[in-house]
Amino acid sequence: QQQVKQSPQSLIVQKGGISIINCAYENTAFDYFPWYQQFPGKGPALLIAIRPDVSEKKEGRFTISFNKSAKQFSLHIMDSQPGDSATYFCAASYNTDKLIFGTGTRLQVFP
Amino acid sequence: GAVVSQHPSRVICKSGTSVKIECRSLDFQATTMFWYRQFPKQSLMLMATSNEGSKATYEQGVEKDKFLINHASLTLSTLTVTSAHPEDSSFYICSARDTRGGYGYTFGSGTRLTVV
């Protein structure tokens, strides 16, 4: 119930393309869903986050789509750039408690 | 924005010695901090939740006597790896929750521990 399943494990996208990463959860009590970007040897950095009362949130090239009934949420990276090449983690938490992380997606954007 | 400083970024120690890692919230107070461990090409595994002024809450399977956590002030939490062994070599990351503007979990830059 505490798991957050993330797919795909790795993703290769051409520059300018759309990168899509998906996550699914079981615990309907989760009320906070962030996405983190991590570069090698660095800590994760918050990209964008959403609460279950909205279905979509957009910040620049990054969009979260949230489907409460399906218990799924996804990250869309528009106009993907080589600098976006990193590992992306979805996460979820309940009532300001600990974050539960997905397994991660390694994104490679080729010129 | 919220900033979490973690020190040191890299440390090499000999087997049997202890290593202390510091995590500081620079521009906000954090009553709760979290310590994670990350193996190469894997996700972050929560080790413990550090609460200011009280004992840490450890996740199942994490040895509390091996990984000592102290959260003595609202801006500082420390993780001490005691009697380190090569299998303790890993990337350790702390996180703090900034409640000023909502949830906001901010992560430190991580500490690469190598035990030789």
Image (cartoon, grey):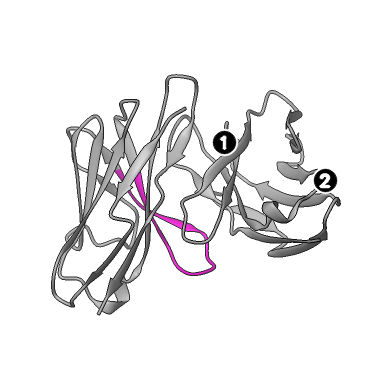
Magenta segment boundaries in residue numbering:
B34-49
Q: Is B90 situated above or below B24?
A: below
The residue where tag 2 is placed is A79
Q: Chain of mark 2?
A: A
Between residue A79 and residue A33, name the one nearer to us: A79
Query: Which amino acid is tagged 2?
Result: Asp
Q: Is A89 situated above or below B25?
A: below
Q: Residues within 10 Å of mark 2 (few under 14, many from 20)?
A: some
Give how far across and how far down residue B48 sits, in percent: 32, 49
Give how far across and how far down residue A67 sits, in percent: 76, 36
Question: Is residue A90 found left or right of B86 in the rendered image?
Answer: right
Q: Secondary structure beneath disc 2?
A: loop
The residue where tag 1 is placed is A30
Q: Which residue of the protein is positioned furthest toward the top in this rendering?
A: B100
Q: Residue at x 76, y 45 (%)?
A: A77
Question: Is residue A99 found left or right of A22 in the rendered image?
Answer: left
Give how far across and how far down residue B63 sits, in percent: 24, 62
Is residue B39 shown in magenta?
A: yes
Q: Residue at x 78, y 49 (%)?
A: A80
Q: Is A58 situated above or below A76?
A: above
Nearer the observer: mark 2 or 1; the answer is 2
Give how far across and how far down residue A91 sits, in percent: 57, 45
Q: Are marks 2 and 1 in contact (CB under 8 Å)?
A: no
Q: Disc 2 versus disc 1: distance between alpha carbons?
A: 30 Å
Number of callouts: 2
Sooner in the amino-acid sequence: mark 2 or mark 1: 1
Q: Chain of mark 1?
A: A
Between residue B108 and residue B37, name the one nearer to us: B108
Q: Secondary structure beneath disc 1?
A: loop
Where, quadrant-wise, is the C terminus of chain B in this rendering?
bottom left
